[in-house]
Image (cartoon, rainbow, N blue to C red):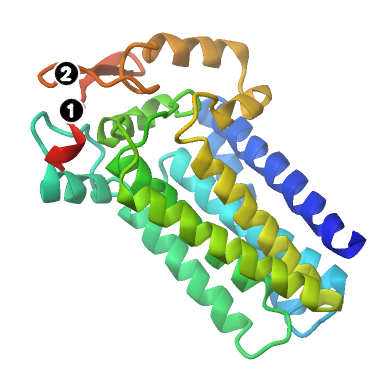
Amino acid sequence: MTEFALPLLFATVLWFVATGFVLWLDKLPSHTWPVSITLATIASGFAMGGIITTAEETSPWAAYVAFACALVLWGWHELSFLMGFVTGPNRKSCPPGAHGWRRFRLAAATLIYHEVAMFACLAVIAAATWGKANQTATLTFLLLFVMRLSAKFNIFAGVPHLSTEMMPDHMRYLASYFRVGQPRWFFILSVSGIAVVAAWLADLALSSRGGVATGYALAFALVALAFLEHGFLVVPWQDTAIFRWAVPDHERRKAAALVPEDAGITGQMLPQNETNRLAMGKSTVQCTQWEKLNEF
């Protein structure tokens, strides 16, 4: 059982620290971002080298290294997105009245470059480890990619509780594509699928040995964290609270001022014809009305 518990602890702590570190870097003054993304790019190069080096290894340490390297690559993509380097062609708020397919196209255009870049990275990792004994890195990045897509689709379709506290000022136009409302069928399908994948990975981890077991246990930890992340979308307590240590006090106060509790972001539905305005830096941009779920 220790062989299963240690990877769970390692994955959870590394995910927590890595996520907080990315948020901390993003909250530094914007003039530091080029240096941060450059260093992150260099680190990503070493991470890819680590994945290739450990691809033939089957020991537990190789699984840990491959897992950590995959998280470094994932962190680069998250950082490049949050800092605005790799996003999409649309950097405007959703226009009032946009819904259905038009709203989906506009929302997808806000981050399509980011999604394509992550998919390309996944393809490179898969190619580098194809047919090799250690598939931990590929499985890790694949699960991160799929689970994050699931969360994004659910936020777009509508969930009761959302938080924009950690959202950078220059990315606040994204909030206009969020929808607050009761979970839809896609949410139930998502969490059910995540639970099935978690059970499958747990069974594989417990029935395997050595580095293979470690890799499956690390993957199970990620899926369990994704399950919790989805759960936070339907409960009042936000998971962003555990990362407030990574955000300076003045940034938190500014975020709270930009998105008041009754603005609809944190779980309350605005009237059908009311428009919510979110601040972006020194300017104010118009966001779309929060539509009723049956109008999507």
**Which residue is label 2 attached to?**
275
Locate residue 249: give its quadrant: top right
Label drawn at residue 288:
1
The C terminus is located in which quarter?
top left
The N terminus is located in which quarter?
bottom right
Horizontal relation, residue 260 to residue 126: left or right: left
- Is 234 in front, or is 138? 234
Q: Could you tell me which residue is drawn at 10 percent across and 37 percent down?
A: 98
In terms of secondary structure, where does tag 1 sit? loop
Give x and y (percent) for residue 54. Answer: 77, 77
The amino acid beneath tag 2 is: Thr
- Is 225 in front, or is 19? 225
Q: Could you tell me which residue is drawn at 73 percent across and 59 percent down?
A: 68
In terms of secondary structure, where does tag 2 sit? loop
Give x and y (percent) for residue 202. Answer: 70, 66
The amino acid beneath tag 1 is: Thr
- Is 53 in front, or is 18? 18
Locate residue 125: give its quadrant: bottom right
Q: Could you tell me which residue is drawn at 65 percent across and 28 percent down?
A: 242
